[in-house]
Amino acid sequence: MKQFLSLLIICLSFTSCVKQTIDIFDGDNPDDCPVDVDITATTLTPNTGEDIILTAKPANVGYNWTGPSGSGIRELFGNNIFNIYAIKIKNSGWYYCQSVTPGCNPVSDSIYIDVKYKQGNPPCALTNNHYTGTSMPDVNAPNVRKSFDETRSSVLVDVSGGWGSPTLRIIFNPSIGNSEPKDGVYTTIDGQSFDSDDDNDAIFVSCLYSNVYMACRSGQSVYISHTSGKLTAAFCSLKVSGDIGWGPIVADLTGQVTENQF
């Protein structure tokens, strides 16, 4: 009886080991090769700046990962977990993975990730088509014109309240081309030149008053929306700075403008 039990235990242990072994795709046996791949994501619609994880199954296979064209996102001979940190709007598109198993034909899958603009409301009370700034007069019912500057390849919004009043210019990232800016919370950069690292929600704001040119500081929020189909830009205590000849000047701009000139 003891001999029988010992043999039974050995047999069961051997069976368990064999099962664990054939779960590993080594390519030596065609039956061990993966026949398909399935990708899932922690979210298909992340907000810009969020981290997401792509997971491919089966798990015990190597993979090549490739992001959308032009994104520069790529990982060769990785595992089945692919982390994307601080994803950008411009990284929206198809993500592909392909199995890499010696002795096996590759199989692949893809998944579409649609990165969204951050949403939010201005944290201050605003009146449409009214803006003001530190040591500046209030401007009511300004002329607000949206256009496309072919030289800059950028959508512009020019705001003027008439002779002697402060004027504003809003420049969108050329990466969006001549398309209508989408609603969302945009983030300012501190110069008129955008680079490849700037996302589609990058924006630049400048102000001209009494022949003093002032540019926005980086990292501030501008709220883009649409009112009856017309583009609206809102900002609260947006800091702009310039040089008046004998020293720097800093002003806070607060306002909301909606395009009204076509």
Image (tube, helix red, strand yellow):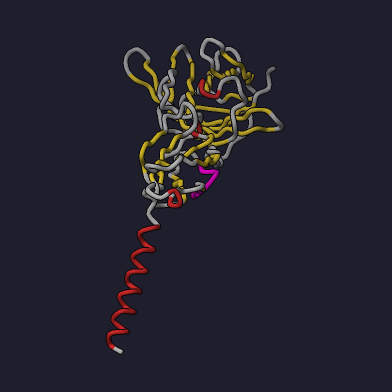
Q: Nearer the viewer, residue 202 or 82?
A: 82
Q: Judge whether residue 44 is colored magenta.
A: yes
Q: Position of residue 258 (x, y in %)?
A: 64, 27
The answer to whether residue 147 of the structure is visible from this angle is: yes
Query: Who is closer to the viewer here, 144 or 104?
Result: 104
Q: Position of residue 98 (x, y in %)?
A: 45, 39
Q: Is residue 221 magenta?
A: no
Judged by its main secondary structure, the magenta piece is loop
Return the x and y of residue 236 as percentages of the image width and height.
50, 35
Residue 27 is situated, as x and y percent measured from the top left of the image, at 39, 47
Q: Residue at x 36, y 68 (%)?
A: 16
The span picked out in magenta is: 40-47
The residue depicted at 51 percent of the width and 23 percent of the height is: 175
Q: Residue drawn at (44%, 48%), measured in percent from left and top?
A: 30
Q: Is residue 253 above or below residue 146?
A: below
**Left or right for 31, reference 14:** right
Residue furthest right as drawn: 228
